[in-house]
Amino acid sequence: MAISVYYELAAPESFKDPDVVRVLEATRKRAISQHFGVVSALNRQVAEGRLTFCIPSPFQTGGVIKVLPTTGFWFNVQLAHSSDSASVGLCRFPTMIRAAGREIQSGLGTGWHFQGSCRTQNPSQRNFDEFRKRHAGLVDLLATLQGHGVEADVEDDGDFWTARDAGVLEEKFRGELEAGPLLDEAFANALVGRAPERRPTLFASALRGQFLAQFTKRAK
């Protein structure tokens, strides 16, 4: 049971370090005004692992290569106490990287990029209003970046990014609550090699996403 938001950010090469700092500080202040759990200071590279950018692997179908940044800025937002956190930033990455013993192009050019994700639906949280504040708050931060000239490619399990409709978001939220027991049953059945009686409704999960993606393919 989980609703998540996945996002890729991009800013042009013309953005200099002061421009990136200005945009991210404005977004960070927006986050502070929304009374999230914790908003960190603006950090300058590197939090290894947090700031990698995943690109498709040319050597393995469905595989990815993690590219480390050369420079960048980021901050972290804990959407609420006991909730997952989201990182927001912009980084520059090398145009050429070494993978599998070969030099390949990263495809990231000379501009700024960032990849992030956050599970906004806590499995123990059944209060829609609290969830809505978290989810809509994260969407608002991404929209704030757009307003400062940053491109945002967003995949929102709650469909709030495109619809901005609390009714649609609540429908997704309630659907996940109902799907929770089915999802847990499917997970347990798969571990013992048993097929579930019916396929559960699956949304992206930060904890089980990779397994569920494989399970969904097998269940079709």
Image (cartoon, rainbow, N blue to C red):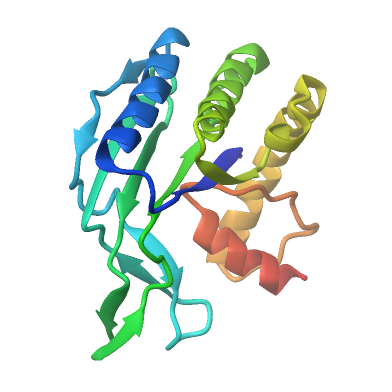
29 or 208: nearer the viewer? 29
26 or 54: nearer the viewer? 26
Label count reads 0
Residue occupying image coordinates x 58% and y 14%: 130
**The quadrant where residue 160 appears:** top right
Residue occupying image coordinates x 38% and y 53%: 13
Q: Quadrant of the C terminus?
A: bottom right
Residue occupying image coordinates x 51% and y 26%: 141
Q: Is residue 10 left or right of residue 195?
A: left
Residue 80 position, x and y percent, is 43, 18
Residue 66 versus residue 184 in the image, above or below: below
Residue 205 versus residue 193 in the image, above or below: above
27 or 183: nearer the viewer? 27
Residue 205 position, x and y percent, is 55, 47
Residue occupying image coordinates x 39% and y 30%: 23
Q: Is residue 64 left or right of residue 125?
A: left
Q: Is residue 189 visible?
A: yes
Residue 127 position, x and y percent, is 63, 15
Q: Is residue 158 left or right of residue 30?
A: right
121 or 41: nearer the viewer? 41
Q: Quadrant of the N terminus?
A: top right
Residue 1 versus residue 106 in the image, above or below: above
Q: Is residue 218 left or right of residue 146?
A: right
Residue 62 position, x and y percent, is 52, 77
Q: Is residue 126 visible?
A: no
